[in-house]
Image (cartoon, coloured by chain):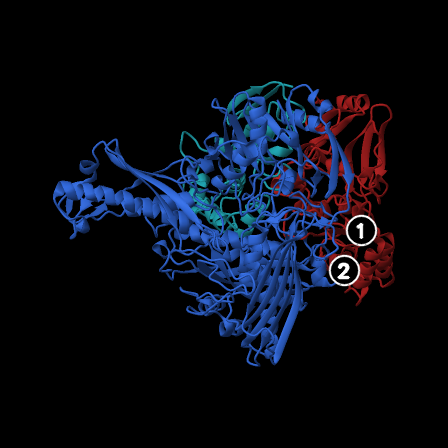
Chain colours: A blue, B cyan, C red
C-alpha cells in the first residue's frame, strides 16, 4: 500500500511481475459462472450439426438434401454449393474445403450442415441427407504415400515438405556408431472443452462469432475468404476456452456456424460432442524416425543422421512448420559438428495432423533421447554425463548454424534433476493405489521393478523461419471513481494458461496502478498472434509492456510539462508521479484529469529467417527454451503395467512473471508428455479412427500422475521483455522420453515405440 | 415431457423435454445452469459431476426423467450467500484452476470427499478424484487445493 | 421416445411386456452413453430407478446357492458403491470388482443388474459372479420368475439369456465360504475398461474352486478345467485340510489352464496374445493370494 505525498512511495501491491498473482477469472471459474463457448445461449437460437464422411477417401457423386429439409424443426441444410466465398480454408495453405464438394479425403470430413430447433432434430435430419459416395482406395501408410507411384491425395503429390539439413562433413565416420528406428503414435490434444461457437447474424449483414480458439485473427482471415465478406463484417469474440494445446489453431465450427446463421437469420450454436471432437480437430503427427549417432570412444558426438517421416493426414494444416521443427530441432540440445537430417511431411487419407504442444520436437525427442541412452551404454558413460558432455552451451551453434545467444543450461538442468531426492522405496505392504494397476489388484509387489530415466530438450519459442510474428496491445489509463484504472485490450487468446493474469501484472508493473481491467478479447483490436509456440508471455507480454511504456511516456510528458521538469527524472508509481529520489510530485489524477490516455502498439520479436533449402542452415528461431526431466517408474514387468512414481523436472524460464502459473504449466505439460509415453494414442486403421472417445483414448488420471518436484531457473534472455523465455512446451517434450527411458530401464526391453503398451513390455 | 426438479434449493420446471435428454442437457440448456460441463458425455471425465439426492453422479448419464422430483446440487450451488465454499476458495488460491473446464465437476467431487473424509490421505484424494480428468494441471495443484480445503474445513 | 417410469415391480414388468421397443435403464451408465453418442434410439426408456425394491439386498439362509449355504439376494438396482460399503465381507470378489468400476460417480449409479443387462464381455461384475456360482433371477409378467445360473446367462457378445419381456430382478450370490480375488488389467491406473480380468473363489466348504474370465472371450466365462485341476490337486494333496503351502508350480499351472480357457481377440484395447498372457499371470497371482488368505484364516476348519 502506498504512503502519502512527501515521503518515499512504497507501493507493494500484489500482482506485479514476479508475483504469483491469482487469476482474474478464478472466482468465475469456481462458481460455474465463467462462460465457455459451449455455455453460450441466445434467444431464438437454433442448433447446427455437421454431417461427416464415413469414408477416408471417396468421390461425392451427389448429395440429396430433400428428405432432410422436410424434417419439422429444420431451418437450413447446407452443402458445398452454399459456401459463398472460396470453399477452402487452412492455416498455412487453404487446401481444405469448408464442406467437401468433389472428394472427401479423410474419415470425418465435413460434408453438410443442418440447423434445427433442437440438436436431436438436427441429428435426425442430418441422418436423412443422402450422400452418394464412390469409395476410393485410401492411402493410409505414410511411407507408402511417399512412393512415386502412390495415388496422390492432392495434386501434384503427397509430399507436404521435405526439409534437408546438411552441416559439416556428411560422410564423416566415427569409432562408435549407434542407431535406431523409433515410432510415435498419434496423440490428441484432448482439451476438455469441446469445439463450440455461437454465430449471431448482425443487422449490417455481417456476423459475430463467439468461439473458443487460439488465434482470432487467423480464423477471421480464413473466414472472410470463405464467407466472401470483408473483415469489418466478420467479427470474432473469444468465448471461454476449455483448453487448447494446439487443437484450436485450425478452424472447427467457425465458418459452419456463420454459414447457418447467415442463411437462417438466427443465432446458431454448434457444440461438438467428444466423439465429433476427435474428428473436429487435427492431432499430433505420428512419426517414423530413423536415427544414427557417431561418436568418439568417450561419447563425444561426431555426427548425427536422422530421417523423419510425419504423417500429415489429408490436409496441410501446420505440417510444414512441424516438419521445420522436427528437422531444425530434431537432434536435441546437443553439440553435433556433422549433421544430415531429412524430415518429411506427407499427405495421406488419415486424419489431418497439425499443431500440438511441443510441435515436432516431441516426436524427435523420443528418438534422440533413446539413442543418447544407447550411446551412453555402448561407450560406458553415465546417462547424465553423456548428455552433459554433449550438451549445448551458450555461444554454441546449433545444427542450423544458429548461435545460441542466451543461456543454454543443459548440463545444469540435468545436474539439478539428478540431484533431486529420489522417492522412497516401495513399502513392504504397499497400498494397492500406489502400485501398477492400482485397485485393479494385479500385483501386491510381484514382478514390480523400479526404473529411472532422464531426458533433456530444447524448443523454439515463437514462430520461426521468417514468419512475421507480432502482437498488438492497446492500453488505456484513466481515472474512474477516483481510482486509476488501466484497461488492457489484446486479441491474444486466453486458453487457461494465464495470459490475462500476465497482462494485468505487466500493466501494474509498468503503470504503477493496482486496478487493471482485461478487455474482452476480440478482433476490434489488432492481432495478438497465436496462443501457441509458448509465445504469448513473450510476444503479447512484450506488446503490453510496450503499450504501457507508450502510455506512461504520454503521462510523464504531460506531468513534466505541468511540473516544469524534465521527463527523464520522472516515474509513475502508486498512482503518483514520482521524482528521481522517490519524492511524490503529483497525483496521477492531477495529470490525467478527465482524459484517458490510450496507446496501441505492435510488438515484434527479433526477425527470424528462412533456412537454406539445400543445407537447412540459417537463423530460423528467435529463442530456445530448455528443460530436463527425471522419471522414476515402477513397472510390473510380468503384466506390463506402469506406475510413475516421480516425475521431476528443471527448466529455465528466463524470468517467471508468475511463478505459480509457471509451475502449473510445467506440471500440466509434463502430464501430457507422460500420457504420450504410456497411454495416449488415436488408433487409426485403414483410415478409420478406432477409439474416438474418452473410454478408449486414455489420458492420465490423478492416480496416474505422481508428485512432481519442479525447479525453475531464471536466466534472463537479454533480447526478450523482462528476460522471459517461453514455458509451456518444453515440459511436454522432455517428460515423455524420460518416462520411456525409465520403463526401458525397469524392463530391459528396447521399446522403440510410444505409447508403450503393456504387451510391448511383456513381449507378448 | 415435463421435468420438475429442485436444483440448488430452487424448484425448476421445464416442458417439452425430449426423453433422450440427459440431466446435464436440461441443466445447461433449459434451466440456465451451464456450470456443469459437457466434456465427454460418457461418464469418463467427471466434468458434469453434480449431487443427485446427495450423491455425486455424472449428470450426463442421468436421463432427464430420472431427475424428476429429485434434489440436485450443482457447482452453482456450492457458494452460500455470495461467499465461496472453502473448496472453491482453495481451488482459486492453490492455482488448481487453469482452463477451468474440469473445475466444476472436481469441486463437487472434492466437496463430497471432504464431507465424508475430513482428513483424506493423498491416496484417498487420488482414488476419490480419479473420475475427474484434468488436462491442464497435471493434478498437483488440485491435490494442493484439496489438502488446503480439508485443513481449513477441519479448523472451522 | 417415451419415458416410462413405473414405481412398482408389477408395473415395470407390465411395461416391459407392453413395450418391446423400450430399453431398460437403471444407473444409466451404459444406456445414456449410447443415447449421447447417437448409437441407439429406442422407442422408449423404461426407468427402473423408482422401483425401490430393486435397490435392496438381504442375506437369505440356505437359499439358492450351490452347497446350501447363505446367499445374498442382491437387488438388480443396488449400486456398486453400496456393494463396496456393505458387502465386502459377504461378497469380497464382487466388492473388489465393484471398486474397479469407473469412478466414484459411476459407482454411485451403476448396478450389477445393469451390468448383466448390457452383458458386455468386459463387465466387471461378471467374473466374480461366475466364480461365486451366482444365479440371476429374472421375471416376466406372463411367466413369472425363473433363475438362470450365471454360467448360462451370457449367450454372446453383449447378449444374454433374458427374454424380451423379462427384467432382471436380483442376483443370488452365495456368501463367500472362502477367499476370493479379483484382478483387472487396464492401461491406466484408474477408470479403465478391462483389457482382461480374472476372478477366483475358493470354496473350501465343497472343496471347489470357482473362476471367472472377463474381456477375453465373446462372453464372460469360467475356466472349468482350471477349476477342476486346482481343486483336484488341492484335494489329492490333502491341502484343504492341512492348509499347507501350495506346491511349486501349482499356481502357475493353474494360470496356464485359465489362459487356455480364454478365446480373446485383438482390439484397440489389447492384443489377444497379451490378454491370454495377462490372464495366466493374474490367475497365478490370484490363486496364490487366495491360498495365502485361506492358510491364514483362523476362523474355520474346512
Chain letter for the residue marked with disc 1 in the picture = C
Looking at the image, residue A601 sits to the left or right of residue A32; the answer is left
Along the line of sight, which residue is nearer the eye, B23 or A226? A226
Along the line of sight, which residue is nearer the eye, A384 or A56? A56
**Residue A525: image tag:** none
Q: What is the spatial separation of the Cα atoms under label 1 and label 2, in whole angstroms?
A: 22 Å
Residue A33 at least partly seen: yes
**Residue A536 horizontal/vertical position (percent):** 43, 48
**Residue C265: image tag:** 1
State the residue position of label 2: C284
A392 to C14, vertically: above or below:
below
Mark 1 crowdedness (10 Å alpha carbons): few <14, some 14-19, many ≥20:
some
What secondary structure is marked by label 1? Answer: loop
What secondary structure is marked by label 2? Answer: helix
Q: Residue at x 24, y 47 (%)?
A: A11
Looking at the image, residue A298 sits to the left or right of residue A470; the answer is right
Q: Quadrant of the C terminus of chain A?
A: bottom right
Q: Earlier in the sequence, mark 1 or mark 2?
A: 1
**Residue A68 horizontal/vertical position (percent):** 71, 24
Residue C89 at least partly seen: no
C198 to A559, vertically: above or below:
below
Along the line of sight, which residue is nearer the eye, A5 or A608? A608
Looking at the image, residue A195 sits to the left or right of residue B151; the answer is right
C222 to A68, vertically: above or below:
below
**Residue A173 horizontal/vertical position (percent):** 61, 78
Amino acid at each position: 500500500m502506498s504512503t502519502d505525498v512527501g515521503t518515499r512511495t512504497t507501493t507493494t501491491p500484489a500482482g506485479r511481475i514476479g508475483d504469483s498473482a491469482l487469476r482474474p477469472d478464478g472466482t468465475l471459474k469456481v462458481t460455474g459462472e465463467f462462460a465457455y463457448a459451449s455455455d453460450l445461449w441466445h434467444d431464438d437460437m437454433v442448433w447446427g450439426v455437421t454431417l461427416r464422411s464415413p469414408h477416408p477417401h471417396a468421390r461425392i457423386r451427389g448429395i440429396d438434401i430433400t428428405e432432410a429439409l422436410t424434417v419439422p424443426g429444420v431451418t437450413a441444410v447446407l452443402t458445398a454449393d452454399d459456401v459463398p466465398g472460396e470453399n477452402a480454408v487452412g492455416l498455412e495453405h487453404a487446401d481444405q474445403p469448408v464442406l467437401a464438394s468433389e472428394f472427401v479425403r479423410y474419415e470425418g470430413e465435413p460434408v453438410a450442415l443442418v440447423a434445427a430447433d433442437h440438436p436431436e432434430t438436427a441429428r435426425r435430419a442430418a441422418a436423412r441427407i443422402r450422400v452418394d459416395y464412390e469409395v476410393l482406395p485410401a492411402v493410409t501408410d505414410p511411407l507408402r504415400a511417399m512412393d512415386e507411384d502412390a495415388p496422390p491425395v492432392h495434386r501434384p503429390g503427397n509430399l507436404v515438405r521435405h526439409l534437408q539439413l546438411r552441416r559439416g562433413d556428411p560422410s564423416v565416420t566415427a569409432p562408435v556408431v549407434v542407431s535406431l528406428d523409433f515410432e510415435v503414435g498419434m496423440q490428441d490434444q484432448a482439451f476438455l472443452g469441446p469445439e463450440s461457437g455461437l454465430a449471431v447474424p448482425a443487422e449490417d449483414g455481417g456476423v459475430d462469432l463467439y468461439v473458443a480458439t487460439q488465434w482470432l485473427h487467423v480464423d477471421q482471415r480464413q473466414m472472410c475468404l470463405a464467407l466472401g465478406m470483408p473483415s469489418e463484417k466478420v467479427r470474432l469474440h473469444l468465448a471461454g476456452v476449455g483448453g487448447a494445446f494446439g487443437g484450436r489453431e485450425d478452424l472447427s465450427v467457425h465458418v459452419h456456424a456463420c454459414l447457418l446463421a447467415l442463411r437462417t437469420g438466427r443465432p446458431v450454436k454448434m457444440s461438438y460432442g467428444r466423439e465429433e471432437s476427435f474428428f473436429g480437430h487435427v492431432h499430433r503427427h505420428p512419426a517414423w524416425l530413423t536415427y544414427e549417432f557417431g561418436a568418439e570412444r568417450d561419447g563425444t558426438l561426431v555426427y548425427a543422421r536422422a530421417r523423419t517421416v510425419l504423417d500429415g493426414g489429408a490436409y496441410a494444416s501446420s505440417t510444414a512448420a512441424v516438419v521445420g521443427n522436427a528437422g531444425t530441432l530434431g537432434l536435441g540440445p546437443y553439440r553435433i559438428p556433422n549433421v544430415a537430417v531429412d524430415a518429411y511431411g506427407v499427405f495421406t487419407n488419415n486424419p489431418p495432423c497439425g499443431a500440438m504442444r511441443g510441435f515436432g520436437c516431441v516426436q524427435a525427442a523420443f528418438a534422440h533421447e533413446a539413442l543418447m541412452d544407447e550411446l551412453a551404454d555402448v561407450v560406458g558413460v553415465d546417462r547424465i554425463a553423456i548428455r552433459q558432455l554433449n550438451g549445448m552451451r551458450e555461444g554454441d551453434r546449433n545444427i542450423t548454424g544458429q548461435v545460441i545467444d542466451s543461456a543454454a543450461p543443459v548440463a545444469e538442468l540435468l545436474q539439478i534433476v539428478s540431484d533431486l531426492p529420489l522417492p522412497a522405496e516401495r513399502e513392504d505392504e504397499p497400498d494397492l493405489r500406489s502400485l501398477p494397476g492400482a485397485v485393479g489388484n494385479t500385483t501386491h509387489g510381484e514382478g514390480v521393478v523400479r526404473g529411472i530415466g532422464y531426458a533433456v530438450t530444447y524448443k523454439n519459442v515463437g514462430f520461426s523461419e521468417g514468419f512475421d510474428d507480432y502482437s498488438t496491445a492497446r492500453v488505456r489509463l484513466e481515472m474512474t471513481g477516483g481510482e486509476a484504472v488501466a484497461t488492457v485490450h489484446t486479441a491474444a487468446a486466453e486458453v487457461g494458461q494465464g495470459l490475462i493474469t500476465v497482462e494485468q501484472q505487466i500493466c501494474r508493473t509498468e503503470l504503477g496502478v493496482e486496478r487493471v481491467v482485461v478487455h474482452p478479447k476480440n478482433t476490434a483490436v489488432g492481432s495478438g498472434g497465436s496462443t501457441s509456440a509458448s509465445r504469448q508471455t513473450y510476444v503479447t507480454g512484450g506488446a503490453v509492456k510496450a503499450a504501457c511504456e507508450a502510455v506512461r511516456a504520454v503521462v510523464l510528458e504531460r506531468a513534466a510539462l505541468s511540473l516544469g521538469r524534465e521527463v527523464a527524472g520522472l516515474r509513475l508509481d502508486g498512482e503518483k508521479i514520482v521524482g528521481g529520489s522517490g519524492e511524490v510530485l503529483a497525483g496521477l489524477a492531477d495529470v490525467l484529469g478527465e482524459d484517458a490516455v490510450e496507446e496501441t502498439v505492435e510488438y515484434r520479436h527479433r526477425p527470424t529467417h528462412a533456412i537454406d533449402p539445400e543445407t537447412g542452415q540459417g537463423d530460423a528461431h528467435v529463442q530456445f527454451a530448455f528443460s530436463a526431466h527425471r522419471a522414476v517408474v515402477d513397472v510390473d514387468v510380468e503384466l506390463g503395467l506402469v506406475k510413475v512414481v516421480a516425475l521431476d523436472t528443471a527448466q529455465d524460464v528466463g524470468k517467471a512473471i508468475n511463478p505459480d502459473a509457471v509451475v502449473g504449466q510445467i506440471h500440466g505439460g509434463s502430464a501430457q508428455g507422460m500420457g504420450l509415453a504410456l497411454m495416449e494414442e488415436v488408433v487409426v486403421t485403414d483410415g478409420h479412427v478406432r477409439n474416438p472417445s474418452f473410454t478408449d483414448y486414455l489420458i492420465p488420471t490423478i492416480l496416474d500422475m505422481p508428485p512432481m518436484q519442479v525447479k525453475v531457473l531464471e536466466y534472463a534472455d537479454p533480447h526478450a521483455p523482462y528476460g522471459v523465455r517461453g514455458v509451456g512446451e518444453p515440459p511436454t517434450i522432455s517428460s515423455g522420453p524420460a518416462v520411456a527411458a525409465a520403463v526401458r530401464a525397469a524392463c530391459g526391453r528396447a521399446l522403440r515405440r510410444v505409447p508403450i503398451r503393456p504387451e510391448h513390455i511383456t513381449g507378448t | 415431457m415435463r421435468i420438475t426438479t429442485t436444483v440448488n434449493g430452487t424448484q425448476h420446471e421445464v416442458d417439452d423435454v425430449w426423453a433422450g435428454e440427459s440431466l446435464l442437457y436440461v441443466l445447461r440448456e433449459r434451466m440456465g445452469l451451464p456450470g456443469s460441463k459437457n466434456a465427454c458425455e460418457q461418464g469418463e471425465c467427471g466434468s458434469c459431476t453434480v449431487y443427485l439426492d446427495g450423491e455425486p453422479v455424472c449428470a450426463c448419464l442421468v436421463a432427464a426423467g430420472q431427475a424428476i422430483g429429485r434434489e440436485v446440487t450443482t457447482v452453482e450451488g456450492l457458494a452460500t450467500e455470495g461467499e465461496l465454499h472453502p473448496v472453491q476458495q482453495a481451488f482459486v488460491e492453490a492455482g488448481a484452476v487453469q482452463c477451468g473446464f474440469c473445475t466444476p465437476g472436481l469441486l463437487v467431487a472434492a466437496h463430497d470427499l471432504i464431507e465424508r473424509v475430513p482428513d483424506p490421505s493423498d491416496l484417498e484424494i487420488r482414488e476419490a478424484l480419479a473420475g475427474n480428468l484434468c488436462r491442464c494441471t497435471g493434478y498437483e495443484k488440485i491435490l494442493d487445493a484439496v489438502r488446503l480445503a480439508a485443513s481449513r474445513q477441519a479448523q472451522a | 421416445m417415451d419415458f416410462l417410469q413405473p414405481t412398482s415391480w408389477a408395473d415395470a414388468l407390465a411395461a416391459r411386456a407392453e413395450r418391446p421397443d423400450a430399453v431398460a435403464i437403471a444407473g444409466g451408465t451404459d444406456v445414456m452413453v449410447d443415447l449421447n453418442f447417437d448409437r441407439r434410439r429406442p422407442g422408449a426408456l423404461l426407468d427402473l430407478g423408482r422401483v425401490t425394491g430393486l435397490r435392496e439386498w438381504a442375506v437369505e439362509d440356505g437359499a439358492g446357492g450351490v452347497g446350501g449355504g447363505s446367499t445374498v439376494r442382491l437387488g438388480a438396482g443396488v449400486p456398486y458403491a453400496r456393494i463396496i460399503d456393505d458387502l465386502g465381507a459377504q461378497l469380497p470378489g464382487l466388492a473388489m470388482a465393484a471398486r474397479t468400476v469407473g469412478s466414484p460417480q459411476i459407482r454411485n449409479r451403476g448396478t450389477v443388474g445393469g451390468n448383466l443387462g448390457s452383458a458386455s464381455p468386459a463387465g466387471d461384475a461378471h467374473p466374480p459372479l461366475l466364480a461365486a456360482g451366482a444365479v440371476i433371477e429374472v421375471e416376466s409378467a406372463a411367466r413369472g420368475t425363473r433363475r438362470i445360473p450365471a454360467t448360462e446367462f451370457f449367450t454372446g457378445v453383449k447378449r444374454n439369456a433374458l427374454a424380451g419381456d423379462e427384467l432382471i430382478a436380483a442376483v443370488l450370490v452365495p456368501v463367500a465360504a472362502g477367499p476370493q480375488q479379483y484382478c483387472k488389467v487396464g492401461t491406466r491406473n484408474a477408470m479403465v475398461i478391462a483389457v482382461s480380468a480374472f476372478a477366483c473363489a475358493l470354496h473350501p466348504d465343497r472343496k471347489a474352486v470357482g473362476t471367472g474370465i472377463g474381456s477375453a472371450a465373446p462372453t464372460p466365462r469360467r475356466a472349468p478345467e482350471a477349476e477342476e485341476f486346482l481343486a483336484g490337486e488341492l484335494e489329492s494333496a490333502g491341502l484343504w485340510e492341512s492348509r499347507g503351502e501350495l506346491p511349486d508350480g501349482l499356481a502357475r499351472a493353474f494360470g496356464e489352464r485359465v489362459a487356455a480357457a480364454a478365446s480373446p481377440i485383438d482390439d484397440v484395447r489389447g492384443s489377444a496374445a497379451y490378454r491370454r498372457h495377462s490372464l495366466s499371470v493374474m490367475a497365478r497371482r490370484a490363486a496364490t493370494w487366495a491360498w495365502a488368505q485361506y492358510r491364514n484364516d483362523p476362523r474355520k476348519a474346512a
